Amino acid sequence: MTSIIITIGDELLIGQTIDTNSAWMAQQLNLLGISVTRRIAIADDKDAITIALDETVGKTDIVLITGGLGPTADDITKPVLCDYFGGKMVLNDHVLNHVKQIFSNRNRPFLELNRKQAEVPDVCTVLFNRIGTAPGMWFEKDKTIVISMPGVPFEMQAIMEDEVLPRISERLKGDAICHKTLITVGVGESFIADQLADIERSLPAHIKLAYLPSLGMVKLRLTAKGGRESELQHETDTYALRIKQRLGDIVAADKDVSMEQIIVELLTRHRLTVTFAESCTGGYLAHRLTMVPGASEVFKGSVVTYANDIKQRYLHVPESVLHTDGAVSEATVLQMATQARIMFDADISIAVSGILGPSGGTEEKPVGLVWIGLATAAHVYARKYVFRHDRIRNKELTFNAAFDLIRKELLEKYEGGENKE
Ligand code: ATP
Ligand code: MG
């Protein structure tokens, strides 16, 4: 199956809104094994919409459209689609009641203009929008399914999840697809590809391995297609295990989760707490950890000690150390980590101090130099990193490296290094 995505909206073309809908929808289709062959962005304009439909209907299996369904004059997608598929507008009572309910829940007056939200072409299947007022619409013509949804990202996502993806999956029945994701940290994709060359060569034709790199991490995704689902599951699990054993402790997870989720899960499992003493990351480690629901089980708090005198006053970094070794040094992060752990009575603490750039580097201490310290009741140590990117990416890499240190510490001390070959 193939698919084409059309996003409608003047705001997309002037660059005011970034088209995140296309990326999200493409990921969802991809998971079902449907390839997206084109993405089109057009204005809220009758001719533009008609041309885009002419170019796609009858030429692909599924066309996903978002945007332009609001009640305002610039939102014209609905009448254009109604014309195109030869229907007429009818009032849908179910949608009307839902729209009225939304307005009364929000304590807002229901205007005549809003009645338009409940009008739908009589030639489509209405896709219920539990979050918003504009319903989605499902048309079929010339063997192409055309689906129109609101532009608001979370409304589109709700309609996709509630109505669209289940219906598409139903049509795909008999054509099973199975995915398995491994998350690796700290090494590049070419290194991994080199390590996995023979395993990759041995994969049967119906199983593919994709490398999906992001900053400091590479996701490895196995996709198996065709045949029985239970068999595919077994095959992908077997290959994933081989890959995991080959790569050892650079594999941080065997499911699609974030680094902070991995750490919260590990700490929760072992009933441990963590704290941070942050300099160059300015609270970013704490922010990322607290994005995970359940972080309160493992996180009591942390300190941001940005200036030297604050490091001295609150974390007792000796003036002599700051003077001779400097703030970005092994000795400094060792002291920061040790003191923060005691101060917060945590099981593990991480301290970071670095020069993220673009200025502030010297020959001896270049931009991108970051020291990360880790302390537990039993020991304390530090590692030196030199990142080579801009300020934002260096911060992100520091986060990854710091959380990876926690992960390795826990693996070694609490999980018996279970990932090692
Ligand atoms: P509504 O019924 O809420 O008016 P709509 O279908 O008319 O929905 P639009 O008016 O086109 O949607 O857009 C609503 C919001 O969604 C705007 O804030 C817009 O910036 C955002 N949006 C629209 N298209 C996209 C897109 N492709 N990616 C991300 N955001 C988008
Ligand atoms: Mg719009």
Image: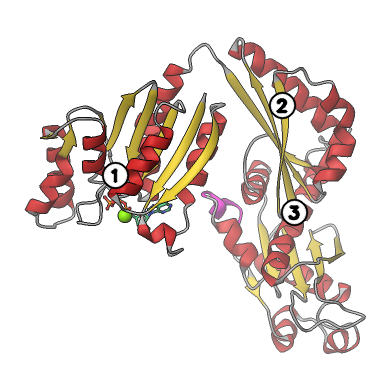
Q: How has the structure been colored for display?
A: secondary structure
Q: Residue 147's image quarter?
A: top left
* N-terminal-most mark, 2 or 1: 1
Q: Give x and y (percent) for residue 100.
A: 12, 45
Ligand 1 lies under 8 Å from the Cβ of mark 2: no
The residue tagged 2 is 208
Describe residue 62's horizontal placement relative to residue 328 as left or right.
left
Q: What residue type is labelled 3?
A: Gly
Q: In this view, does 50 lie above or below 202?
A: below
Q: In this view, does 122 lie above or below 362?
A: above
Q: In what quadrant of the picture does the C terminus appear?
A: top right
Q: How far apart are marks 1 and 3 (CA)?
A: 36 Å
Q: Which residue is drawn at 64% across and 75% down?
A: 304
Q: Distance between the residues labelled 3 and 2?
A: 23 Å
The residue tagged 3 is 216
Residue 407 seen from this side: yes
Q: Give x and y (percent) for residue 206.
A: 70, 18
Q: In this view, does 128 lie above or below 402?
A: above
Q: Residue 131 carries which label?
A: 1
Q: In this view, does 266 lie above or below 396?
A: above
* N-terminal-most mark, 3 or 2: 2
Of 101 and 224, nearer the camera is 224
Q: Do the residues labelled 1 and 3 touch (CB within 8 Å)?
A: no
